[in-house]
Image (tube, helix red, strand yellow):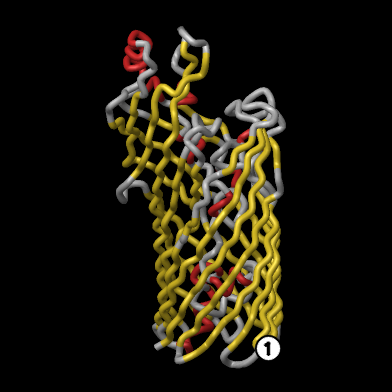
Amino acid sequence: MRAVNHRMILAVAVALLVVPSLSQGAGFALFEHGNRGMAMGGAMTAVADDASALFWNPAGIAFQIDEGVQVSLGVTFIAVDQEFYGASPYPGDGYRATQKTQTFFPPHGYLIIPLSDRVSFGFSATTPFGLGTHWDDDFAGRFISKRVDIKVFDLSPNLAFKLSDNLAFGFGVDYAIGQIDLTKNIGMINPYTQQLADVGQVHITTDGLGNNAWGWHAGLQAKFGQFSFGALYRSELDIDYTDGYGSFRQFQTGYADYDALLTSQIPFGQRVSLNSNIVMPDYISLGMAWQNERWIVSGQWGRMGWSSFDELPINFPDYPHLSDTVIQNYTDSDQFRIGLEYKVSEKFAFQLGYLEDETPQPAESMSPLLGDGDRTGYTIGMTLNFYGMQTDIGYMYLEPEGRSTGGQSYDGYNGSYDSKARLLGITTTMKF
């Protein structure tokens, strides 16, 4: 009789890979934390002239002291279409599946309080990493994932100093809280039928504030005439998932002795404690912008240190025979962004943007949780100023390059992934 396949049981490992349906930045980073900035393609490191500077470049809030206290709240709605086309040996040529339609809405919020004519305090709440996928119950990849929802929340106090009329420096501390929610089926070859059978389901989740990490970030902004320059660095976030568990549910196969054997090897009907660790990448960006009374033109290069994500351990302290380590072998990846804004009047402006993001994911680690490819994005938006309130509306069309596992999938699940995403967001800022 075939032994239990531990890797198939514990696809938690790949559950931490985040699908592009919820992300703009390649891998599973989110950059939709200010919809004016999103409408400019995310090319904001050198601009950073509104409340969202707390995300793009905290040094920018030191040049906003004359704006008074600012409170900014926003949300971005993200919808995705993704299709999978199977390849040999499994699930085979001609197989096709479409992911269920989902809409995500990562929020963001900012508070800026000037402390003096050269020092400003800021606090931000963002979701810098996240994912969500949902496949049909009969999806051939259901033994890797049926449904997943993963988020990282970041709470960050910041200080910024205006060192001179031309130069500012800002830094902040990041407190990150991670959440994982994954459901997948457990598949085994039934020895009586010699066919793959669904013998159970595992639901893995983490909760509580114990799944956390501390990090930091710092930025510089310099202004010389109509030109501005910006630099930002964000550290790694080494998140320990210590408050988690797996719940195992058995599906009866109709063969009592086989069901009993499975029960002896898999903790069906129990909640089993688990822990894991994932190192979210560091990030550096350099930007330059030119502006006059009506126009802003900005460009930016960024690099994410995804090589930190080389493997993922999954540990069940009470059931060490179920523990596993999954190899991912991500590589560092580059980003290129261009943005434009035209100020029609004091009350209205519009933005355009373009971006390219390289994928950090090797073809071998592509899976139903993340089938990533190099991405191209096109953005547009507008800003309205009425009654002392600034409202930014941004839209992005994001198209990752279709990509195949090339028959080398670590999970033995081969094929190609094709997806498109549409993002629409609104950010409102009030000044006091």
- The residue under label 1 is 294
Q: Residue at 60%, 47% (x, y): give it.
A: 82
Horizontal and vertical percent position of residue 90: 63, 25
Q: Nearer the viewer, residue 247 or 193?
A: 193
Against 243, residue 1 (above or below) is above
Q: Is residue 182 visible?
A: yes
Residue 32 placement (x, y as % from top left): 54, 64
The residue carrying pointer 1 sits among few (fewer than 14), some (14 to 19) or many (20 or more) residues within 10 Å by Cα, namely few
Q: Amino acid at mark 1?
A: Arg
Write the residue at 48% across / 57% down.
104
x, y percent for residue 227: 70, 81
Q: Residue at x 61, y 29 (%)?
A: 413
In this view, 300 is above or below 385: above
- Mark 1: secondary structure: loop
x, y percentage for residue 392? 54, 77
Q: Residue at x 71, y 77 (%)?
A: 297
- Position of the N terminus, as image quadrant, is top left
The picture quadrant where one finds residue 322 is: top left
Which quadrant holds the C terminus? bottom left
Q: Relative to residue 379, is residue 275 depicted above or below?
A: above
Q: Can residue 288 be seen in the rendering of this structure?
A: no
The answer to whether 5 appears left or right of 231 in the picture is left
